[in-house]
Image (cartoon, rainbow, N blue to C red):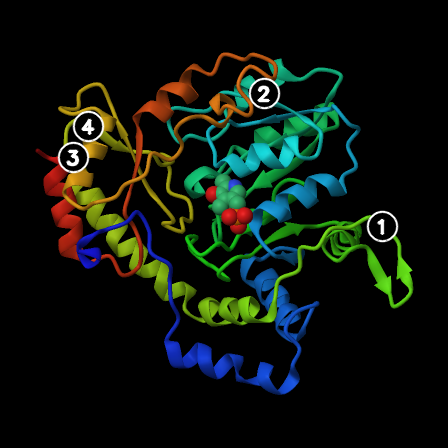
Amino acid sequence: MQEHKIFVTRSFMPPYEEYIEAIRPLWNSHWLTNMGKYHTLLENKLRDYLDVPEFSLMVNGHMALELTIQAFHFPEGAEVITTPFTFISTTHAIVRNRLKPVFCDVKWSDGTIDETKIEDLITEKTVAIVPVHVYGNLCNVEKIQDIADKYGLKVIYDAAHAFGVRYLGKGVGCYGDASVFSFHATKVFHTIEGGGVAFADHKLYERLYNLKNFGIRGEEIVCEVGANAKLNEFSAIMGLCNLRHIEENIQNRKIRYEAYCRGLKEIEGIRLLVEPEEKTRNYAYLPIVVEEGSKKSRDEIYEWLKINDIYTRKYFYPLTSDQACFKNKYRTVLLETARELSRRVLVLPLYAELEMDEIDKIINLLDR
Ligand SMILES: *Cc1c(COP(=O)(O)O)cnc(C)c1O
């Protein structure tokens, strides 16, 4: 039965022979991790592909975010304005740094942080803004930067969904003080597990290097209390293989995304949760919003598709601020739009190898 099930995503696999050939040198070198040759190669290639000034490769997206926040040395208990409409990792990374998340509402149009509501949340304790380019939808980077400049705040983007997205001729990772990517197996580009940080300030490269490698700077020198967040060579080689196929991968997603769009246009009460204007997209996700006029509710659609072997996901429900570990622990802010959106959003299956007739099947089921 396994074969009939359609999941929300499916990891991209490079051709088997290509990966096997690529890892062969590791058997000669015996060099499996610790900033190896392929780690360095991938770090450089990703810096070029993402079109960013500096890039630091890490073991996963979460550690990349946690260590990036740590690298700014914010005072304990300081406040960070962020979005609750995200994967739990974003909020965990803030709280694990002993900082206080202040949840800001999001926009109904695209699910990104509502930049018009940020200023009201700023206090003398605010040190940073951590927005998320959710589903690859770009935050209002200009307005957020204006606010940050006015109040002297850092901006650290969770860009886990935004691999390869470009805006105004620049890589998405050029905005803010740092942007964190995830290369988890379920993401558009992956290294099995992996992640990284884009930024402009070279001093941050040195700090992140220390934090990801125990602060070791020489055989007998430890200069900082660092963690271990290095990417191993097998993962780096998976990344190098996948990077060779990234354009065809995104192109295949685009074709499927557009097929969905054509079908969904005909269905009353369902809209895509994407930015209105055309920006460079990576077709990472296919989020829909089940609006008032729909025949079935979001949860009914979820169950209906499930009994038909289509496994969608309620990303992002519940809001991270409503999870047991965070509920009622931080400043209360009205999150009406975020809460309503999280009750109405559903992410449909989208990946490079999704069959076109499977999309037709999903559209037909949604139309009933
Ligand atoms: C995937 C993801 C992360 C965490 O990345 P990992 O590589 O799985 O650690 C962080 N934030 C968001 C929004 C994500 O989707």
Tell me which label, 2 or 3, sits earlier in the chain.
2
Report the residue at 59% width, 81% height from top.
26
Q: Which residue is farthest right?
A: 220
Report the residue at 25% width, 31% height from top.
271
Label 1 secondary element? loop
> x, y (%) of residue 96?
66, 34
> Looking at the picture, which amino acid does disc 1 mark?
Glu
Q: What residue would you read off at disc 4? A: 300
Report the residue at 63% width, 51% height from top.
197
Mark 4: is the Cβ under 8 angstroms from ligand 1?
A: no
Q: CA distance from mark 2 to mark 3?
A: 38 Å
Q: CA distance from mark 3 to mark 4?
A: 6 Å
The reply to whether residue 171 is visible in this rendering is no
Q: Is residue 35 left or right of residue 315?
A: right
Q: What residue would you read off at disc 2? A: 118
> Looking at the picture, which amino acid does disc 4 mark?
Glu
| Label 3–label 4 contact, CB within 8 A | yes
